Amino acid sequence: MKLIRKIQKQFSTLFDFITTLLKLRSLIVQLAKRDFKNRFAASYLGIYWAFIQPFITFFVIWFVFTVGFKSSNIEPSIPFVPWLLCGMLPWFFMQDVVNQGTQSLINYSYLITKINFRSSMIPIIKIATSLAIHLIFLIILVIVTLLYGIPPALQWVQIIYFLFCSVILLLSITWLTSSITVFFRDMENIVNVGMQILFWATPIFWHHSVLSGKLQYIAYLNPFFYIINGYRDTFIYHQWFFSKPLFTCYFWIFSTLCFIGSALVFSRLKPHFADVL
């Protein structure tokens, strides 16, 4: 009975969160626009830095693996540039959200200490800001894919699904990391190091088939792999997400448990935010 009550309480909290999110959508959009401007306000090139750094990183990796190492980790019939973009663009988006979202409660401490604002909405502001930049990159990805002779397909519409997957996963992660960062500032550095390790451990610029045995299964356990592989299935291989039910079930079980666990941690720590900030 206690377990059933806890589950009911969590679903009630989730419904209340969604309702509040809809009510505050205009405010969240305004704060996201303000965050977008403030992030690049102090630099001379401004918003262009949102695109310069990813492009430089992409160019360096492309150069290394096409001119230097001459990577053969993918099928010869698949153009390397769109294949690489399908891996790096979602990673840039997710990495940016995790890094920025981890600091979000501290950056918006005035909303918590001075205004009656639901703090669980704050990481969404960072997600919305990064998502706006990511949508522009998606347009570039579509153009590059077409230029390399990969025809458009009906499966392209499922990018909406993978964006939704990304938002749910990222919201879960940033709820956890941002709430812990309020009390343990070293969490920012831990997250930065963790994302660097995941960058090299995730099949972004190498194909997961190069792994064998248990290592390949470990790669499959990485939730970021599901999203990156989903981008490639969408734009390159033209496969539906439901054609891989095992991966899809695992991702949603993991994301749901992460969502519930992060929500519990956030709700437990939330009453003490104002005292520390």
Image: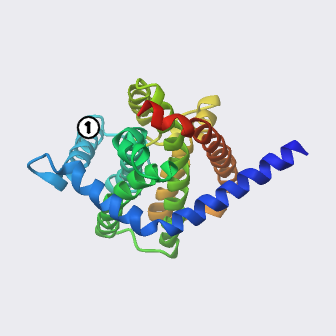
Q: How many marks?
A: 1
Q: Is residue 209 above or below residue 78?
A: above
Question: Whole-percent x and y of residue 272?
Answer: 53, 34
The answer to which of 14 and 169 lies nearer the viewer is 14
**What crowding class fits label 1: few (fewer than 14 Cα within 10 Å), some (14-19), or many (20 or more)?**
few
Judge from the rendering whether residue 52 lies leftward or rightward of residue 141; answer left or right.
left
Amino acid type indicated by mark 1: Val
Which residue occupies the foreground of this view, 81 or 140? 140
Residue 5 visible in the picture: yes
x and y percentages locating residue 276 in the rendered image: 44, 30
Which quarter of the figure has residue 221?
A: top right
- Residue at left offset 85%, top offset 49%: 4
**The C terminus lies in which quarter of the figure?**
top left
Q: Residue furthest left?
A: 44
Whether residue 240 can be seen here: no
In front of the other: 198 or 18:
18
Q: How is the image coloured?
A: rainbow
Q: Position of residue 5 (x, y in %)?
A: 83, 49
Nearest the eye: 198 or 47: 47
Secondary structure at numbered mark 1: helix
Residue at point 34%, 56% (across, down) = 129
**Which residue reaches farthest right?**
1
* Residue at 23% over, 42% down: 63
Q: Which residue is mark 1?
A: 64
Q: Position of residue 177 (x, y in %)?
A: 49, 36
